[in-house]
Amino acid sequence: MKPHTMTLPTPTRRRASTTWLALAVVAATLGTATTAVWGQTAWPSKPVRLVVAFPPGGLADVMTRLLQPQLTEALGQPVVIENRGGANGNVAADAVIRGTPDGHSFVISSTGIESVNPFMYARMPFSPGKDLVHVALLANSQLFLVTRPSLPPNTLKAFVAYAQANPGRLSYGSAGSGSTPHLAGELFKQYAGIFATHLPYRGAAPALQDVLAGQIDFAFVPGTAFAYVKSGKLKLLAVASPKRTDNYPSAPTFLEEGLGPVFADTLFGIYAPTGTSPEAVTRLNREVNKLLASATVKARFADLGAEAMPLSPTEFKALVAEETKVFSGVVKARRIAPD
């Protein structure tokens, strides 16, 4: 019987074995690195959720739905819209902030969540400056004073005289306490020297519906009301802006009538929760701004009394800082409190 012998690997075999092991390690490392890089640049990797801070039918909702199909195509992922009205944007923003921080959820709201709410609410569910990131500004919207058609006055001056002769008999609705329609109403009452009962709603659309139904007398609403004005279901008396609107150039500003400044232009923008990747913010800003710069979107927004405003996140933030100086003062001076 031959003695059992063990064949030892030759130096060549040892070198080959070591080489293959090294190559495997390099491949694994490169694969991990490639995955990491791809993960950073492949946003969005799943549907993008836009939480609109107002009910369906309001201006923010209408503008978002105008952009939705083209944004879905540009991003290569479905864009899902969810409506969460309440607390002047706080409900929607809080839902996004407290949700899964995966970089695919954003809130669309008026900028009142920054310029009004911190000065109106004794306790905020979040800190706008710490918990939200500016992504893109959608538009600046003018507000219009509309009344139910059965109300006698047909002009702003006649309406003021009527309100002064009927103190406490008129009521007006707004998109909620602290909303720009509410601020416009308070400024109007102040400069006109009238009293009217404020009824807050969970968005401009429900307030508008009650003016149409004759449940309340007037409201400050966005250009979503134009169709009702044209059909005679509403009277449009004035625009709460520094300039007249091209849609109804005959409607004066309050300042022109000696009542002012009743300025309550409304900014709507997209915010992300803090921690969202810069790549996601940059990409969404770029795609939204491309759409806002298109002639089609500009025209559609203009039909709603809104001006498309493609800005960088930095420009967006600076504009809201200027707005805050004005609106925070109105909140304090008129002692505006939550619903």
Image (tube, rainbow, N blue to C red):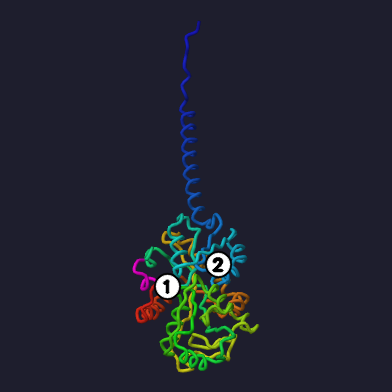
**Horizontal arrangement in the rendering, residue 291 relative to residue 182 (left or right):** right
How far apart marks 2 and 1 lie (CA) works out to 18 Å
At 50% from the left edge and 60% from the top edge, which residue is drawn?
105
Please tell me how crowded label 2 is: few (under 14), some (14-19), or many (20+) other residues with Cα within 10 Å. some
Q: What segment carries the magenta color?
A: 116-123
State the residue at coordinates (54%, 54%): 45
Q: Say what amino acid the circle numbered 1 marks.
A: Lys
User: Which is more toward the observer, 325 or 202?
Assistant: 202
Residue ranking furthest to the right = 231
Badge 1 density bin: few <14, some 14–19, many ≥20, Cα 10 Å: some
Type of amino acid at the residue the image marks with label 2? Glu
Looking at the rendered structure, the number of numbered marks drawn on it comes to 2
Residue 188 image position (x, y, % from top left): 45, 86
Where disc 2 sits, the SS reads: helix
Q: Who is closer to the viewer here, 234 or 312?
A: 234
Image coords of residue 96 (percent x, y)? 46, 60
Whether residue 118 appears in magenta in the rendering, the answer is yes
In primary-sequence order, the first of circles 2 and 1 is 2
Q: Is residue 162 magenta?
A: no
Q: Secondary structure at mark 1?
A: helix
Quickly name the residue at label 1: 317
Q: Report whether 280 appears left or right of 234.
A: left
Q: Where is 109 relative to 261, above or below?
A: above
In which quadrant is the C terminus drawn? bottom left
Instruction: Identify the residue at horizontal 50%, vertical 42% (top origin).
Output: 27
Q: Which residue is mark 2?
A: 287
Residue 326 in percent (x, y) is at 39, 81
